[in-house]
Image (cartoon, rainbow, N blue to C red):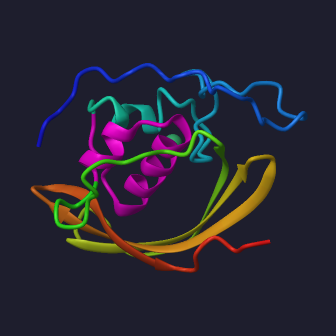
Amino acid sequence: MSRRRSRPRRKTPPVSHAPSSSSSSTAVSPDAPCPCGLPASLTDCCGRFHRGQATAPTAEALMRSRYSAFAVRDRAYLLRTWHPDTAPKRLETDPETWWRRLEILGATGGSPFHTEGAVSFRAHFTERGREGVMEEHSRFVRHAGAWVYLDASGTPRPSP
Ligand SMILES: [Zn+2]
């Protein structure tokens, strides 16, 4: 597994389709509330995991940090917290998708004392100006001591 110290800067989207209600279409700033919804800044919350300063202690914490990584487009973190058996070779994040809010619906296992866990969640997003919700049941396993994402079952994005 290669750990990249630097990643490319976010590219400016060629065309802005951001909804007019949104004042900013830039990535989340470190002082902003964490995208995962916990009452802490991105730096103090999921940012610690993104920077590699800590590893997520529970499957739910990993789930939250991966959601936040999608929100800030941290592909390197997403790939290194993906089980090697199921991880894609490369990962694209849709520059037109903005992750707005995460709802954790339930979790089983996944504590510091478990080796497997599952988290059900609902992720709210805006895509090309349209709001959508993705509901998923994600499975996590401990791999080399750290929680990683294995796979998911769930409904695909509902088409309008
Ligand atoms: Zn967080």
- Magenta-highlighted residues: 54-81
Instruction: Kindly give the residue lying farthest to the right in the view shown.
Output: 21
Q: Quadrant of the N terminus?
A: top left
Magenta segment's dominant SS is helix
Left or right of residue 113, residue 75 in this image: right
Q: Is residue 96 within the magenta segment?
A: no
Picture coordinates of residue 38, whole percent (x, y): 59, 45
Picture coordinates of residue 37, whole percent (x, y): 62, 47
Picture coordinates of residue 130, whole percent (x, y): 80, 54
Q: Nearer the viewer, residue 68 or 73?
A: 73
Q: Is residue 98 above or below residue 10?
A: below
Q: Is residue 132 above or below residue 21?
A: below
Q: Is residue 70 within the magenta segment?
A: yes
Q: Quadrant of residue 26?
A: top right
Q: Nearer the viewer, residue 5 or 37?
A: 5
Q: Identify the residue at horizontal 79%, vertical 56% (top origin).
A: 131
